[in-house]
Image: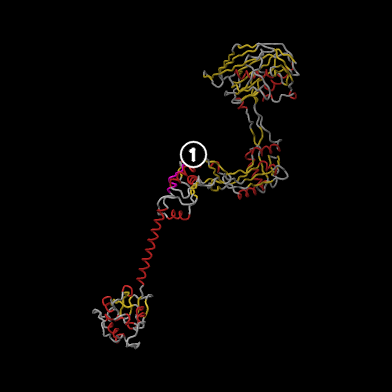
Amino acid sequence: MPVESHVDEVESAPTRGRDDAVSPVRQTVVRRSMFERAATLPHGKDDRPHSDAEPPSRMPQPAESTDSLALSDLKDVPTQAIAPEAAYTRENTGILPGVALDEELEETEVSKGHTVGAGKDSQIDEYGQEEAVPAKRTRHKVAFLACAVVALLAVVYVGAAFLLSNRVPAGTEIAGVDVSGMSREDARAALVSLLSPRASEPVTVSVGEKEATVDPTVFSLKVDEKATIDSLVGFSFNPVRLWAHISGGRNLAPVLSVDEEALRAEIAKLATILNTEPVDASVAFSASDPANVSVNATQAAEGMSVDTEAAYKELSTNILSATQPIRLAATATAPAITDDIAAKAVEQGTILISDKVSVMVGEKLVELTPAQLASVASFTPEGSTLTLALTPQALADMVRAGASDVLKPGVDARVEIVDHTTPTVIPSEDGVGIDEADLAAKVLTAATSTNRTASITPIAIPAAFTTADAQALGIKEVVSEIKTPLTSDSVRTQNLLVGTKLVANTLVKPGETFSLSEKLGDISPERGFTSSGVVTNGFNSTALGGGLSQLSTNTFNVGYLAGMVDVEHKPHSKHFSRYPTGREATLWTGQIDMKWKNNTPYGAIIDAWVEGGYVHTKLWSTKYWDVTTTTSAPYNYVQPTTRHNPAADCEPMRAGEAGFTVRVQRTVSHEGVVDPETTGGYTWTYQPVDAVVCN
């Protein structure tokens, strides 16, 4: 059958009444590839080539029905043979029986020789017609394949997650405890036995070079084993957990619980240990060598302060997993006085000591050397600055020493007991001095300027203890007194003469404490003291100042009987009948003292002298306390024995008085109210006077 007739028949196939030349119709065209395959079929008896000028509508018509057209009959049919007007629709596909349109055909819009929607997937045939390629079907295939791959991966993912859900990932450690590949139960048991006990062990923390120890029990540290293992084991779609199973685990921190308030309190305590305060820059003068005076700065240093929030986070989560010492986060704290501030101060100090300063005190010139200025100068931090200042009193002492003929101190008032009968106030005398604060300000101004001269006007300076002060003490009457007999030892009496002169007219102001040792001062021959009899370790001996215990007994009694506070006293080891029994006091410089405190609102003057075979002592003041004393009868007698004394200065003696015990009691009151501080008593035991044998 000639190919031409088949083509013409195809061309004359019905179009269901649609006017293709007027409006676009939806037709099904044979893909170019089909015609290329048809070109390989054998030619018919009419195989003449078609002219490019011949329109497709004039091609020969096939004699047979289009139902008899086979693919073999299309071998020699060129692709140009099918025009747009002869395109096949799905309604007339009967002309190509056996052709699977789902595989070989694609729908496209065609109108007037143009394929509607043609693009990069279309080609232009010899007649200017576009031929579509199967892009839509290809996209469907790709989408299907992608869905299939995703579904497969999802199945694999879910299966892997399920299979690995009850095992800890390989290579996993919890705060150093190996739980690799363990089941949930085994891993939890490992934490209970190996990790949880560590929650009660001390932990070392540090900031910089400082370290401190933390006791986790203080803030109730606990390991939550269940929550820790649950974070690693169990069915989960979390890709991180699945990846851990595949790639292997790592060393993880356990889940912990703490008492937040207690932990924060512990961190506050740690901060007091671990914090480092910033160091301010400082400036100081060096004047040890008058010829080499300098001013030097010490550099500032930053401090470190524990970051409490970061410390809380670290200790509440990583205290068991972090390497010790656990380095806590800290913030730098800047010093208030920086190196730049210190440098400016050095410049100021250098000017101060660059030359001498002249001070005119009235008409008197006093020159202060750089070394003297440096010795009284200092820089004081005030906020974020260094302030240069001169010490007023030390500076004034230098000026007073240089102008001693102009500046004179005042003379304090005194109270003396004239003829042991009349308390008399000796008036004070004003001195000539300088305003120390004014002096310091003016010298500083001069020393830091080009005019290095300061002028000071002398002023009257009242005495430290004025006449009015003395009169206000109310010293007007004797409030207590005692006299004790002398012995026949003239050397001993000499010591008492010296001692009473040193003590006479001693003023004890309200609140002050009288000390006999302090008042007597150095007991030495240069001051008139000599060696006389004393009692040492129960034996009679001699020592410098022997006999001063009698003055101690007298001064103790005037204070005790006036109601003063008994600060310190100790009776003799042996009883001496010349003293009040139980109410006497010994003295040994540097070891045993006699002290009492003035607990009245009035001043007290001690008057003491030797006269008529007695040591006399009176206390002058204004009566304040009502005092009564009692001494019990001796009891608990102990008879003397014989003792041996190996000392080189031993003096043999016969046995004397027996030993005994007494009780001394005192009641002190003011306007009927008993004073609990001074009311009371004490017990004393005297040793017997044993016979002494020297050997």
Colouring method of the image:
secondary structure
| Total residue callouts | 1
Residue 244: give x, y in percent of width and height.
Answer: 46, 54
Q: Which residues are magenta?
A: 221-230
- Please state if 366 lies on the left or on the right of 135 as rendered: right
Screen quadrant of the C terminus: top right
Residue 282: give x, y in percent of width and height.
Answer: 62, 45
In front of the other: 277 or 437: 277
Q: Secondary structure at mark 1?
A: helix
In front of the other: 23 or 457: 23
Quarter-wise, where is residue 360 in the image?
top right
Q: Is residue 509 above or below residue 208?
A: above
- Please state if 402 lies on the left or on the right of 560 as rendered: right
Residue that badge 1 annotates: 217
Quarter-wise, where is residue 621 in the image?
top right
Q: Is residue 533 above or below residue 250?
A: above
Quarter-wise, where is residue 401 in the image?
top right
Screen quadrant of the N terminus: bottom left
Mark 1 packing: few (<14 Cα in 10 Å), some, or many (20+)? Answer: some
In front of the other: 634 or 414: 634
- Magenta region, main secondary structure: helix
Residue 679: give x, y in percent of width and height.
Answer: 55, 19
Q: Amino acid at mark 1?
A: Thr
Is residue 503 at least partly visible in the picture? Answer: yes
Is residue 493 at least partly visible in the picture? Answer: no
Residue 436: give x, y in percent of width and height.
Answer: 64, 38
Instruction: Judge whether residue 275 is colored magenta.
Output: no
In front of the other: 286 or 308: 308
Q: Farthest left residue?
A: 17
Please report the residue visible at 71 percent of the width from the left and 25 percent of the height from the top. 522
